[in-house]
Amino acid sequence: MTATEATEHDRAGQSAIAPATEPQPAPGATPPQAPPMIAKAAAELVGTGALVAVVVGSGIQATELTKDVGLQLLANSTATVFGLGILILLLGPVSGAHFNPAVTLAEWFTARRGGAGVTAREVAVYVPAQVVGAIGGAVLADAMFGEPLVKWSTHDRSAGHLLLGEVVATAGLILLIFGLARTDRLRFAPVAVASYIGAAYWFTSSTSFANPAVTIGRAFTDTFAGIAPSSVAGFIGMQLVGAAVGLALVALIFRPAPSADEPSAS
């Protein structure tokens, strides 16, 4: 997922979100080993759970503090920006800090086409961990605020304009992450990804779920951030469409520079 095929293969162990942060070993020293799969799974489970706890918990807190819906959304989005940035910074070196099946699947797809990314085995571990973590995070947030631990949301989000918002939100997220990877600027991912999600809370009609696992988790809480179970399938479907659109935009915009002996397309 870098600018050239050679670089892609050289960095095959690097995530699309968070670059490796381990220092290079001294000559003759034993190189650092990749984290074990159980550590990666735990990072994805805990990270996704913490993210959903931040989203749901801040939503509950906001509705208890003010009746102004605009202020509620401001509080919710602000907490999410800071929480997501910290989680990516903390857990990125372990699992890549996906916290999102759409990102995991997009990275696996690019790896199949010769880019860097997760393996099929990692996908089989990451996605269930993300979903379980998201559900656990929603239950934890409800518990912290004295809400029923599991109460299906009644917040219907099935309108067409909301589904379009999810396509836009997810496509933009994928474009950002993989665009940073192709331009070798993944060091900015914690700030860039968190900032994008914070902005997308406001410029998309759906308030930017952009994440199938988070969507499932938010169905378990009948609070400000919830989504009715009947709306979950539509959101997930549009998120996957958005991921495909995002990858297509990455391929279109961040094309490798032609070699000296190749004629320019322009």
Image: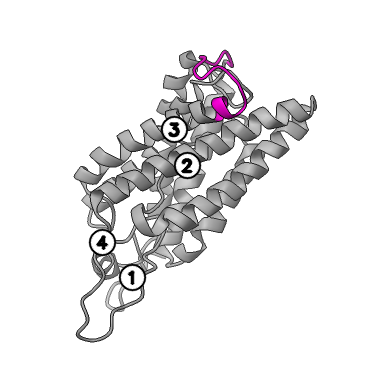
Type of amino acid under label 1:
Pro
Other residues around mark 4 within 10 Å, as few (<14) / some (14–19) / many (≥20)? some
**Colouring scheme applied when the structure was drawn:** one colour
User: Quick check: marks 2 and 1 in contact, CB under 8 Å?
Assistant: no
Q: What residue type is labelled 3?
A: Ala
Residue at screen point 51% across, 35% down: 52
* Three-letter residue code for mark 4: Ala
- Contact, mark 3 vs mark 4 (Cβ under 8 Å): no
Q: What stretch is highlighted in magenta?
A: 141-155
- Kindly identify the amino acid type of the residue bearing the numbered disc 2: Ala
Point out residue 162 in the picture as x, y percentages from the top left corner.
57, 25
Residue tagged 2: 171
Q: In this view, does 196 lie to the left or right of 256?
A: right
- The residue under the point 51% across, 40% down is 51
Cα–Cα span, label 4 and label 2? 30 Å
Front tag of 2 and 1: 2
The disc label shown at residue 134, or none: 3
The earlier-in-sequence mark between 3 and 4 is 4
- Mark 3 Cα within 10 Å, few/some/many (few <14, many 20+)? many
Q: Looking at the picture, tell me which residue is in the foreground, 215 or 38.
A: 38
Give the mark, 2 or 1, whose residue is nearer the N terminus.
2
Residue nearest the observer in this picture, 100 or 111 = 100
Local SS, label 1: loop
Q: Which mark is residue 258?
A: 1
- Report how far apart the C-alphas of labels 1 and 4 lie in the structure: 33 Å
Q: According to the image, label 4 marks what residue? A: 34
Please state which of residues 250 and 148 is positioned toward the viewer in this rendering: 148
Tell me if mark 2 has few (under 14), some (14-19) or many (20+) residues whose alpha carbon lies within 10 angstroms of its own.
many
Q: Earlier in the sequence, mark 4 or mark 2?
A: 4
Query: N-terminal of the two: label 3 or label 1?
Result: 3
